[in-house]
Amino acid sequence: MKALIVEDNAKMRRMMADFIGHKFEKIYECTDGSQALSLYEKHLPDWVLMDWQMAETDGISATRRIIAEFPRAQICMVTTFDSEELRQEAFAAGACGFVLKRNLFELENVLLSSESRL
């Protein structure tokens, strides 16, 4: 399996990669939502771990772009912001998971739930 981490903070990218590395053969990374669609097209990852707040293109917009081109893409929003409005917006954009950065252990549950759907 392959993953794409879209996160502007280098330390957080490394932490997520270390946390999920045992589940993926290859992990790709980028620093902004503006790069996410082109990397998704190039590598076709099984999962995208998407930050919400980034400099150029936010995670919700990037999720919409990926889902528009690849409706079966599996995207999990990974953010420090926790509000019902943001969760609803993420799921409406096409995300199939929502995890807070302070609870990265929940990523395992999101990844496992997708395996049970296969």
Image: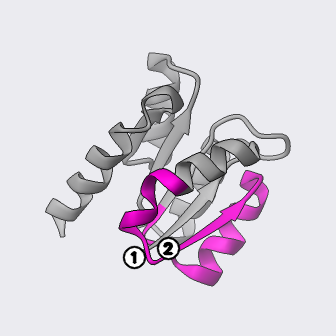
* Residue appearing at x 55%, y 57% in the figure: 17
At label 2, the amino acid type is Pro
Q: Observer-nearest residue: 21 or 50?
A: 21
Q: Quadrant of residue 54?
A: top right
Q: Specify the amino acid type for callout 1.
A: Met
Side (left or right) of 68 relative to 20: right
The image position of residue 104, as x and y in percent, is 44, 37
Please tell me whether residue 32 is drawn above or below residue 118 in the rendered image: above
Marker count (numbered): 2
Whether label 1 touches label 2, CB < 8 Å: yes
What segment carries the magenta color?
Answer: 18-47
In depth, the one of 103 and 40 nearer the eye is 103
Where disc 1 sits, the SS reads loop
Residue bearing the label numbered 1 = 1
Report crowding for label 2: few under 14, some 14 to 19, many 20 or more residues within 10 A (C-alpha): many
Quarter of the N terminus within the rendering: bottom left
Residue 57 among magenta residues: no
Residue at 84%, 40% (x, y): give it.
Answer: 55
- Please, is residue 52 above or below residue 14 in the view? above
Q: Residues within 10 Å of mark 1 (few under 14, many from 20)?
A: few
Q: Residues under labels 1 and 2: Cα distance? A: 7 Å
For this orientation, the residue located farthest to the top is: 83
Is-magenta flag for residue 31?
Answer: yes
Here the colouring is one colour
Residue 7 place in picture, x, y as percent: 68, 48
Image point 43% across, 56% down: which residue?
Answer: 20
> Which secondary structure lies at badge 2?
loop
In the image, taking residue 18 as reference, residue 38 lies left or right, namely: right
Q: Which residue is mark 2?
A: 45
Image x and y of residue 84, in percent: 44, 18
